[in-house]
Amino acid sequence: MTDAMSQMIAEAGRLLGPKAEITDPSEIAPWVSDWRGRVHGASPAILAPASTAEVAEIVRLAAQHRVPLVPQGGNTGMAAGATPPADGSALLLSLRRMRQIRSISAANRLAVAEAGVILADLHQAAHDIGMRFPLTLGARGSCTVGGLTSTNAGGTQVLKFGTMRSLVAGVEAVLADGSVHSGLGGLKKDNRGYSLDQLLVGAEGTLGVVTAVALRLVPAVADRAVAWAGVDSPVRALELLRFLEARTTSVEGFELVPQDSLDLVLKHIPDTRAPLSGTHQWHVLIEATTADSNYAIAAEIERLLAAALQDGIIGDAVIAANEAQAEAFWKIRDTISEAERAEGQTLAHDISVPVADMPRFITDAAAEVERTFPGVLASGFGHLGDGNIHFHVRAASHAAPDWYEAEGAAITRMVDDLVTAAGGSISAEHGIGQLKIDELERLAPPGRIHAMRAIKHALDPLGIMNPGKLVRG
Ligand SMILES: Cc1cc2nc3c(=O)[nH]c(=O)nc-3n(C[C@H](O)[C@H](O)[C@H](O)COP(=O)(O)OP(=O)(O)OC[C@H]3O[C@@H](n4cnc5c(N)ncnc54)[C@H](O)[C@@H]3O)c2cc1C
């Protein structure tokens, strides 16, 4: 450990008190690897400030000693952005103790939540005042407002409400020099030049430490209809979405599930069963909601699905008869990654292309990858209506244990090349972190990288904010 690091740890300990500085390696261990367990880092300490003022003090100390900080929320990120470097040269800055909801107002339709507030707790707080924070995702029990903001997370309701970027009304953050940017005013209109708040959304901790966020709320859901439909291709799935959108504004979730993913869930996840009796090559999970308790949402979706069936767009469909069944449908969707992990080695790609091109992209890209790498299985599932699919490539059943290391990079390059050629993005919602930084540099237009580096240099000239993530200095 360098002298600067030891001094920093000693001074931070005096500042925060012993309970807020963890140096016991066994307590640090769960937080230095990424959620998928693929990237392993090291850090001599976790600092856990409880207020914006304490974060600012820590950042000032870090600047003084030139010690890099890795901000971390729930550590559920998919790009290893919150994983420290393996040489132990950075400190983890956990925001998990900052978990107050400072204010919440149905009249303003705003909540101001500290960075460490868990998404599920925010959902509950909004629900308690008859409102709703409409972004949700599988990690809601552990991901935090700071992490969601810093990765510009998406989730399953983007179709109607957009990503975090559309739901963030303002950000409070400690910048790299220890100054505090306070953007929590919640103004609907504010044109005083560059939006630092929006710059911090999706910055992955490389420009500052998010300490609190003003978040937009919408009226609570009075009723929802959750349906499962079988279709014979992704083209038909998108046709179904457009069919529904032309007739109702209530659809807010529309998830594509291939039969193969459904089979894996049924095989590995307890208490799951196929929603439809017949076999379909592809499936869609549809969620429609209403804030009006007099509106017969289930009847509307039933009528529309019957019409889609008659038009030959879908092969079959079922509407969840109750909340338990609705949750069971969502469980299938939410456990696909877990089931894949149980099955064997999988390479995940969170990609987007223009929505109308996605159905063809899925089938063409899967065929090309399977042809080039014999034995692998490629497919896509997820947010079809956003043009965002989790394009996963599974190792052949007889693959060697080091398949991921041996073939993974070449497969990913191929997928990323196909995505780029299709005018898409190699990271739709998971961010760049350290996993995709090389591919971003390889494939992004030079102007984008140049601008990102210029912003990074301007706001973090000492390079102490999560170095080695998103953009190299
Ligand atoms: C089961 C599962 C399902 C998921 N589904 C989705 C999905 O549908 N859509 C989606 O977009 N993502 C999804 N994710 C990914 C993940 O939940 C999100 O990226 C989430 O936003 C990460 O929040 P976190 O608090 O865990 O952040 P972390 O993993 O701790 O950090 C993520 C990044 O943000 C930075 N960061 C964290 N807190 C701060 C802060 N306060 N200030 C500055 N930087 C900070 C970190 O340095 C890191 O770069 C899923 C993850 C899991 C495990």
Image: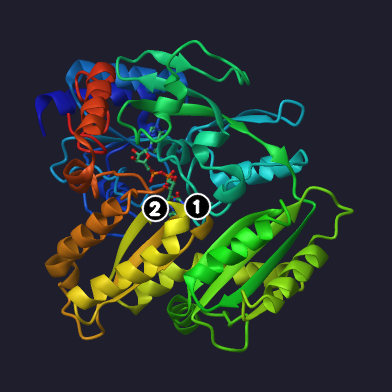
Q: Is residue 188 above or below residue 133?
A: above
Residue at point 53%, 51% (across, down): 140
Residue at the extreme front of the image, as rendered: 311
Whether the residues at callouts 2 and 1 have beta carbons within 8 Å, the answer is yes
Residue nearest the observer in this picture, 426 or 243? 243
| Coloration of the structure image | rainbow
As helix, strand or loop, the secondary structure at mark 2 comes to strand
Residue nearest the observer in this picture, 119 or 455? 455
Within-10-Å neighbours for mark 2: few <14, some 14–19, many 20+:
many
Within-10-Å neighbours for mark 1: few <14, some 14–19, many 20+:
many
Task: Find residue 341 and report its horizontal and vertical position in percent.
Answer: 35, 71
Res. 332 in view: no
Q: Is residue 269 left or right of residue 424?
A: right
| Residue 298 quadrant | bottom right
Q: Which mark is residue 352?
A: 2
Task: Find residue 379 and report its horizontal and vertical position in percent.
Answer: 37, 71
- Mark 2 CB lies closer than 8 A to ligand 1: no
Q: Which mark is residue 207?
A: none
As helix, strand or loop, the secondary structure at mark 1 comes to helix
Which residue carries the number 1 mark?
386
The amino acid at mark 2 is Ser
Q: Please state, as top left, top right, bottom left or bottom right, where the C terminus lies in the image.
A: top left
Q: CA distance from mark 2 to mark 1?
A: 8 Å
